[in-house]
Amino acid sequence: MADKRYLVIGAGGFQGGAVARALLRRGCDVLGFARRGGPSAFRAPGVPLITGDLADPASVRAAFDGITHASVVLPLVYDAELVSAFARNVVEAARAAGVVRLVYNTNTPIPAEPTGLPAYETRRAAEGIFRESGLPVVVLRPPVYLDNLFSPWTGRALVNDGVLLYPLSASRKVAWLSHTDLAEATVAALDAPGIEGTVLRLAGADVVDGPGLAAAFGSALGREITYIALDVGQFQAVLGEVFGERAAAGVAGIYEYAEVADPWFFAASPAPAERALGIRPGRIQDWVAVQPWEVWARA
Ligand SMILES: NC(=O)c1ccc[n+]([C@@H]2O[C@H](COP(=O)([O-])OP(=O)(O)OC[C@H]3O[C@@H](n4cnc5c(N)ncnc54)[C@H](OP(=O)(O)O)[C@@H]3O)[C@@H](O)[C@H]2O)c1
């Protein structure tokens, strides 16, 4: 590993933090990139951090100095110009450093046709910038994360009322993926030979609808759990208090689109990614069983 140096963009966040921790566990030489050190870096303890802003080309270039492999997770920003500038700055810096692999996580699946929704279209545009850059790029398109369910919004109702609230219709099938499995896929994509230029849809081991998700939770927790589809507008209002109106509207767009998306939009076949990356994502029940749900009972 001595000749490889990994940069994780967004290492202070949930997805990037999981990637940085997975690289660190393997003994890799890994550097995180975020705007701030300190508390924002807590999701990747032990990982050295270089601070900078994706909007500032000089700081991105400085972060890429000596880097051979890069994992890119773009932050919760849905301004089209700004997100494209982030991607161009990364491309320019990665090119200057001569990276041999760049893995771009689109944060969500990408619809086949343009939607006008910033959460999808900003990521589609960034994907285009990365793929057309001439760099050795692998694109990972994840579904919805299991870890979204370990949040104050869902955790409290789950623990206190046995209710699983999520802004997706009960009939919508999802191949829920954990951040841990996203990280395993990313680490594999950073090193797997011969997969430059591929776009891989990620998927967890189980494809379930709302009641199926509740059943997996119920079985892991040993109690009855009921799935209730949360109104997207209500979800957006709650998110807006934490992330601001623009970001909340962007995230809500992801779930509004789910109402009209093809039935397998959040449930790709896992086979192509498993074959290309040699990964085997875990089961929903196993993820549920090891989360410290009791923290929400005290909240
Ligand atoms: N598919 C799903 O289920 C799902 C779930 C959650 C989120 N998402 C999507 O994933 C994205 C966010 O991911 P996340 O939740 O992992 O992120 P996050 O936890 O919000 O972390 C974002 C990271 O990027 C850094 N950052 C923010 N702005 C930056 C900038 N201008 N320059 C450099 N670094 C910057 C943050 O640190 P600093 O603040 O210190 O800069 C942090 O390290 C969003 O697009 C969101 O919609 C998808």
Image: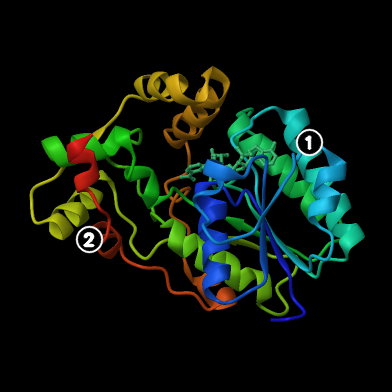
- Displayed quadrant of residue 123: top right
Could you classify mark 1 by the number of other residues whose Cα lies within 10 Å: few (under 14), some (14-19), or many (20 or more)? some
Residue 36 or 267: which is nearer the viewer?
36
Q: Is mark 2 within 8 Å of ligand 1?
A: no
Instruction: Kindly give the residue lying farthest to the front in the view shown.
Output: 38
Residue 233: x percent and y percent?
Answer: 39, 19
Pointer 2 residue: 289
| 96 on left or right of 205 | right
Residue 91: x percent and y percent?
Answer: 83, 52
Residue 250 or 243: which is nearer the viewer?
243
| 36 on left or right of 130 | left
Residue 278 seen in render: yes
Q: Is mark 1 within 8 Å of ligand 1?
A: yes
| 201 on left or right of 264 | right
Instruction: Please name the amino acid that badge 1 sits on.
Output: Ala
Residue 91 seen in render: no
Residue name at image x 51 percent, y 28 percent = 253
Could you classify mark 2 by the number of other residues whose Cα lies within 10 Å: few (under 14), some (14-19), or many (20 or more)? some
Which quadrant holds the C terminus? top left
- Displayed quadrant of residue 283: bottom left
N-term-proximal mark, 1 vs 2: 1
Alpha-carbon span between mark 1 and mark 2: 40 Å
Q: Is 147 above or below relative to 26?
A: above
Instruction: Please name the amino acid that badge 2 sits on.
Output: Ala
Pointer 1 residue: 55
Instruction: Kindly give the residue lying farthest to the left in the view shown.
Output: 223
- Displayed quadrant of residue 164: top left
Residue 19: x percent and y percent?
Answer: 55, 61
Residue 60: x percent and y percent?
Answer: 81, 47
Residue name at image x 46 percent, y 20 percent = 240
Residue 226's tag is: none
